[in-house]
Image: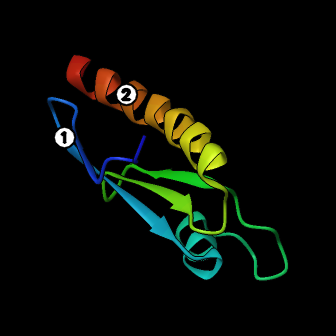
Amino acid sequence: MRLPRKLDLGLAVVSVRLVTQAEMREASECEADETPPDGFWDPESDSILIGKWLPLKQKREVYFHELIHALNDSAYFSQH
């Protein structure tokens, strides 16, 4: 299974991006000496960010984890 590049959640189209550790640190506001997270849901840009450095199996796990965050945000905003 390849990871999709875009998802239509109804209220928003979410992009899925593979990023470097430096990009992940910046997006997640992680300090330079901290290990960046494997994934990050960025509600401001409607993007799921996934670490390029991860093996494919782990990328899939991170994708589904971050998708839950995106769906929760989408459900919340549809009710308010």
Residue nearest the observer in this picture, 44 or 4: 4
Q: In the figure, is residue 3 to the left or right of 79?
A: right
Most distant residue in the front direction = 1
Residue found at x 48% / y 33%? 69
Q: Is residue 11 depicted above or below 47 in this figure?
A: above
Q: Is residue 39 depicted above or below 23 in this figure?
A: above
In the rendered image, which quarter contains the N terminus? Answer: top left
Q: Amino acid at mark 2?
A: Leu
* Cβ atoms under marks 2 and 1 closer than 8 Å: no
Q: In the figure, is residue 24 to the left or right of 18?
A: right
Residue found at x 56% / y 34%? 65
Q: Position of residue 45 (x, y in %)?
A: 31, 59
Category of crowding for the residue at label 1, using alpha-carbon neighbours closer than 10 angstroms: few (below 14), some (14–19), many (at least 20): few
Among the 4 quarters of the image, the one containing residue 79: top left
Q: Give the CA distance from mark 2 to mark 1.
A: 10 Å
Most distant residue in the right direction = 33
Residue nearest the observer in this picture, 75 or 1: 1
Q: Amino acid at mark 1?
A: Ala
Identify the residue under disc 2: 71
Q: In the figure, is residue 20 to the left or right of 11?
A: right
Res. 12 mark: 1
Q: Earlier in the sequence, mark 2 or mark 1?
A: 1
Among the 4 quarters of the image, the one containing residue 75: top left
Residue nearest the observer in this picture, 3 or 10: 3
Among the 4 quarters of the image, the one containing residue 30: bottom right
